[in-house]
């Protein structure tokens, strides 16, 4: 069994990004600048944004954090987005999700200039991704593709099962895995209403679990020799931990690791790659790689 180490891979990629930034700055170019907008004090979001700021430092980027309380109005947040859209010093920015219930996440996403949408959530980027045009690809699917590539996992012609149909992971992952330039695989998407789910999972050469249910994928659902990518990161109560919780993936790791040919751990698998791919998108934004 091969352990697909996302933490080590992400560290290597950040070093590559930092080297490229040093070249750009050394040639008199502009240092890439990522801004993040954080609303409220959700623990998960706080940690995630903190890690993004640290990643920016490691990559040699400039970073700006803009904070609002939970009671910020939608109009105030949209005004902030408009300012960032117009700020030539900012190459890319994100609005950390989830947002408070009184704010329309979709309206905020659509207000972001797609040329600065390094999260890859704007409909323009989603549409361009779906038809194979250059764009910012959402970070988690992009990170999975990069792990598969760097670990030399053969995907062309393989049977890939994506467990989950979210807009952030499941749908784009399925689209990318079926595209010739990325996965070139035969793709099946499974979700909560799928029939024969266990049997369908067992047919997969590559199983990507992104359903958000801790330990959902058992050994009985995995074909011997399959590659298993676990996207799940659910906080599960754990009295033995100082934090009071531990992160659990969608896969029963201990039961599946002896069956799979390769598997990502949680934590330390897909998670670090997600932030790393945001850095890669920011570098692309700084270099105007996709949009002028």
Image: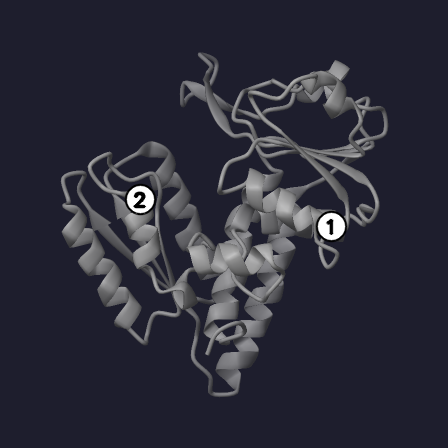
Q: Earlier in the sequence, mark 1 or mark 2?
A: 2
**Label 1–label 2 contact, CB within 8 A:** no
Q: Which one is in front, 41 or 243?
A: 41
Residue where numbered disc 1 is placed: 183
Side (left or right) of 168 relative to 249: left
Spot occupied by residue 61 in the image (x, y as percentages of width and height): 44, 66
Q: Is residue 263 above or below residue 94?
A: above
Q: Which one is in front, 121 or 57?
A: 121
Q: Residue at x 49, y 43 (%)?
A: 168
Q: How is the image coloured?
A: one colour
> Is the N terminus in the top left, top right, bottom left or bottom right quadrant?
top right
Q: Is residue 182 above or below residue 169?
A: below
Task: Give the alpha-carbon distance from disc 1 to disc 2, as whole Å.
Answer: 30 Å
Q: Residue at x 52, y 80 (%)?
A: 24
Q: Farthest residue in the bottom direction?
A: 28
Residue 78: quadrant of the picture: bottom left
Which mark identifies residue 105? Answer: 2
């Amino acid at each position: 069994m091969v352990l697909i180490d996302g933490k080590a891979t992400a560290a290597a990629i950040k070093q590559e990004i930092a080297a490229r930034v040093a070249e750009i700055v050394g040639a008199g170019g502009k240092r890439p600048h990522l801004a993040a907008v954080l609303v409220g004090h959700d623990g998960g979001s706080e940690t995630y944004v903190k890690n993004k700021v640290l990643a920016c430092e490691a990559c040699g980027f400039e970073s700006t954090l803009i904070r609002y309380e939970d009671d910020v109005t939608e109009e105030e947040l949209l005004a902030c987005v408009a300012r960032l859209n117009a700020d030539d010093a900012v190459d890319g920015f994100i609005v950390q999700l989830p947002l408070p219930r009184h704010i329309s996440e979709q309206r905020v996403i659509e207000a972001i200039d797609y040329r600065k949408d390094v999260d890859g959530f704007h409909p323009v980027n989603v549409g361009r991704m779906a038809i194979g045009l250059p764009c910012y690809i959402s970070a988690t699917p992009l990170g999975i593709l990069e792990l598969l590539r760097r670990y030399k996992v053969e995907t062309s012609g393989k049977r890939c099962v994506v467990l989950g149909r979210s807009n952030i992971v499941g749908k784009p992952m399925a689209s990318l895995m079926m595209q010739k330039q990325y996965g070139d695989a035969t793709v099946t998407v499974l979700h909560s209403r799928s029939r024969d789910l266990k049997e369908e999972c067992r047919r997969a050469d590559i199983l990507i679990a992104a359903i958000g249910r801790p330990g959902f994928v058992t050994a009985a659902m995995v074909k011997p020799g399959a590659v298993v990518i676990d996207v799940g990161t659910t906080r599960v109560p754990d009295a033995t931990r100082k934090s009071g919780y531990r992160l659990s993936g969608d896969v029963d790791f201990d039961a599946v690791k002896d069956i799979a040919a390769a598997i990502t751990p949680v934590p330390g698998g897909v998670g670090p790659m997600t932030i790393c791919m945001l850095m890669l998108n920011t570098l692309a934004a700084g270099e105007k790689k996709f949009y002028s």
